[in-house]
Image (cartoon, grey):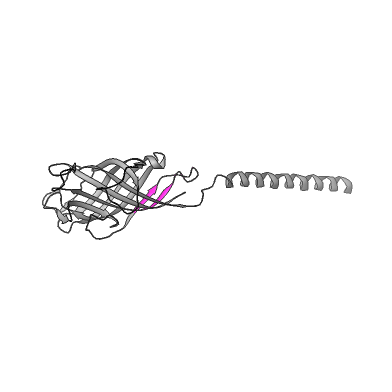
């Protein structure tokens, strides 16, 4: 009987060793698909803005201009703005505000929305930040050669002339594929009345500029 016990014990030890070896292989395999080292990423987004429908509540100063959107081209950001973005566009983007709330007197509020950059393999990203300028219902602010109607997030653009505020941008998934972007953003919506070459001189045409700074892995 003691011999049989030793045999059974030997089988148990062998089975445990095999199980641990298999677990080690699985762990190695999953490790190979983990996110890579973050790479510094800087995007400049240049396009046209479409203002959403304003929804005032009685005499309230609170506005909810949800549904505003923008679309255009993506450029590597090296400190320039959309007046001279460069010739090497690296992709396209869409930008849509799904919910926002702003006080039209103080011109402060919040925005939440989704974006999609072809640079991120068309993966949807979420953004949320503070609104620091809102003049669609009043006279725009002057900022160099720009008339600024809206600004949000970080004051990383050279043409917003608005206070800096929180602005976070995060791609939904994509880390294992190496196309997950996470960082901060700043936007400005403007016209250029004295720039004959601009598509946004007056009327209902508005230019959109955003700068996103962060890391991709």
Magenta stretch containing residue 89, yes or no? no
In this view, 39 is above or below 67? below
Tell me what residue is drawn at x 39 percent, y 42 percent.
Answer: 119
**Magenta span:** 168-183
User: In terms of depth relative to the viewer, which is nearer, 15 or 202?
Assistant: 202
User: In terms of depth relative to the viewer, which is nearer, 55 or 122?
Assistant: 122
Residue extending furthest toward the bottom = 163
User: In terms of depth relative to the viewer, which is nearer, 102 or 212?
Assistant: 212
Tell me what residue is drawn at x 66 percent, y 47 percent.
Answer: 24
Q: Is residue 76 left or right of residue 137?
A: right
Tell me what residue is drawn at x 55 percent, y 44 percent.
Answer: 33
> Which of the 4 image quadrants contains residue 197?
top left
**Spot occupied by residue 18 in the image (x, y as percentages of width and height):** 73, 44
Tell me what residue is drawn at x 20 percent, y 55 percent.
Answer: 133
**Spot occupied by residue 98 in the image (x, y as percentages of width and height):** 28, 44
Q: Is residue 161 left or right of residue 29?
A: left
Count of picture labels: 0
Magenta stretch containing residue 177, yes or no? yes
**Spot occupied by residue 91 in the image (x, y as percentages of width and height):** 36, 40
């Amino acid at each position: 009987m003691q011999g049989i016990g030793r045999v059974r014990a030997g089988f148990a030890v062998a089975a445990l060793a095999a199980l641990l070896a298999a677990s080690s292989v699985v762990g190695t395999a999953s490790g190979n698909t983990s996110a890579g080292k973050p790479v510094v990423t800087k995007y400049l987004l240049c396009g046209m803005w479409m203002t959403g429908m304003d929804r005032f509540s009685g005499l309230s100063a609170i506005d909810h201009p949800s549904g505003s959107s923008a679309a255009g081209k993506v450029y590597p950001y090296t400190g320039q703005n959309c007046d001279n973005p460069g010739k090497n566009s690296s992709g396209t983007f869409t930008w849509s505000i799904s919910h926002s709330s702003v006080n039209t007197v103080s011109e402060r509020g919040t925005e939440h929305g989704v974006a999609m950059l072809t640079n991120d393999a068309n993966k949807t990203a979420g953004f949320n930040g503070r609104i620091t300028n809102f003049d669609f219902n009043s006279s725009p602010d002057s900022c160099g050669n720009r008339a600024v109607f809206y600004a949000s997030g970080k004051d990383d653009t050279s043409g917003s002339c608005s206070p800096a505020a929180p602005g976070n941008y995060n791609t939904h998934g994509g880390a294992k594929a190496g196309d997950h972007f996470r960082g901060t953003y700043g936007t400005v919506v403007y016209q250029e009345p004295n720039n004959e070459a601009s598509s946004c001189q007056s009327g209902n045409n508005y230019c959109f500029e955003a700068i996103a700074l962060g890391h991709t892995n």
